[in-house]
Amino acid sequence: MQRNINIFLGLLSVFAGILFTLAFAPFNFSYLAPLALCLLFTAWHNTSPQQALLRGYLFGFGSFGLGVSWVYISIHDFGGSSPLIAASLTFLFVGFWALFPALAGYLSVKIQLLNNRNRSYLTSPIVWMLVEYLRGNLVLNGFPWLQSAYSQLDTPLAGYIPVVGGYGTGLLVALTASGLLAIVQKPRCRYFLMCALLSIWGTGSYLQSLSWTQAVGEPIKVSLLQGNITQDQKWRPENKLNTLRWYQTMTEAHWDSAIIVWPETSIPAYLSDVNDWFLRPLSQAAEEHQTSIIVSLPINNTETNEKYNAVMTLGKDTGNYKKTHLLPFGEYLPWQPISGLILNNLGMRLGLFTEGAIDQPLLKAAGYPFITTICYEDAFDELVLNQLSAAAFLINVTNDGWFGQSIEPHQHLQIARMRALETGRYLLRATNTGATAIVDPKGKILRQAPLFEATVLTDRIIPMQGLTPYARLGEKPVLIFLMILFLTLLLPNSLFSYLVKNKPEN
């Protein structure tokens, strides 16, 4: 009988993991996130730490197995690996990140046992969020994909994002899940718990009506270029001139825009190869038309043998930004020299870039400073919050062509929307194959270009000033609050044990 229950709860955990991913883009069944976590917490209830670890792992395997399946496309279609190697590496990738829900399950039940299962409905949400932070920031340069709060951009809980950020909002998602479980298992507290959940979600709805930032200038006309050049064609030498010609032609057709943004590495050549004959004349033309052009290309320093993934501004205000948060195994290799030897033997050639400085000055476009992020950097809020008080809007350039017609571009756009909502700034997001979009300060998509179509997206944005509460304080208050809650789960029992051991004898 117990064996059948364990099998059922194991399958339930996999199912819950799949439901959790369905809460994110492009599926957008947002309310499945707290339901999925409720099912997971149910599987952790009244069980052993070892069983909770296994069920957490199965949840993670279901969630990441669906949610990051696009890794296979990157490795096989564009990395040149065989189907077997690509499938094996994807399996290892999914299996590695599934360890984090497993860790959350193990710690949750272990702590519950230390407290004789007291506060069990608080333990799982708190531990879940601390493990999300661990995964999103501290391991392998951080992997904040499929974090709870991203699923809530179109629900009332989105109102909390400018106030407490992603981890604070994620905690409310997890508390909602635990509250739903408690409503079923604690009939005496049912009405109190229902009122508490309604208050949380109702307050979020009210917070959505507030505006934390203000306009600092008149609307600006912008154009975002989406070249739709597939990854297997992008770097071929015979295609370089046609690529540059397309971007130049589209730019010249939109000189009436104050800002024109090209996607990540839209120029398939090093700066030293194209600066004199292509970029300088284009910059002069932009200055004559009072237009700012934001382009992206790699920069190489032959003297130091360093390469940078970079963004450049052309026109009146020129400058460059070098990417600071590099993608592990894509732009740099952790765990050297082992990782390098393995990937070389597998025949996978990856770019090796150098990190840019953290304190780079803000670039300017149309006379306004802006925050720059390149591709994966938009997943890390601290990069966007840095120097935000001086920035009027956000610009992200991305190339999601590595992942073909998968769910990844939709997920990545959802992550980018979070940065606009956290900061109360418009976001211009130019991508090679999609999803190119203009996002307003509420995190809503104003306009979006079709995927896999060469096009130009034009609209107007408003430069903004002021700071949201979260932009002002950052994530530290939420993390401190989580740690205090975590310690309250441990300290009372520890103090009790200490007092028993040191009880004075009569």
Image (cartoon, rainbow, N blue to C red):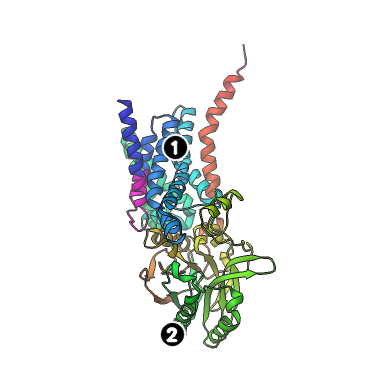
Viewed as shown, does residue 115 lie left or right of 337? Answer: left
- Residue 218: numbered disc: none
* The magenta stretch spans residue 482: no
Identity of the residue drawn at 59% across and 69% down: 321
Identity of the residue drawn at 34% across and 53% down: 30
Foreground residue among 136 and 494:
136
Residue 488, visible in the rendered structure = yes
**How far across and how far down the image is residue 183, in percent?**
33, 38
Above or below 415: residue 132: above
Magenta stretch?
Answer: 17-36
Residue type, label 1: Gly
Identity of the residue drawn at 62% across and 69% down: 300
- Residue 253: numbered disc: 2
Above or below 50: residue 450: below
Query: Which comes before the other along the chain, label 1 or label 2?
Result: 1
Quadrant of the image occupied by residue 351:
bottom right
Dot 2 surroundings within 10 Å: few (below 14), some, or many (20 or more)?
Answer: few
- Residue 105: numbered disc: 1
* The magenta stretch spans residue 30: yes
Viewed as shown, does residue 307 lie left or right of 89? Answer: right
Residue type, label 2: Ala
Identity of the residue drawn at 56% across and 76% down: 313
Quarter of the picture holding the C terminus: top right
Residue 147, visible in the rendered structure = no
Foreground residue among 173 and 247:
247
Quarter of the picture holding the N terminus: top left
Numbered disc in front, either 1 or 2: 2
Q: Secondary structure at mark 1?
A: helix
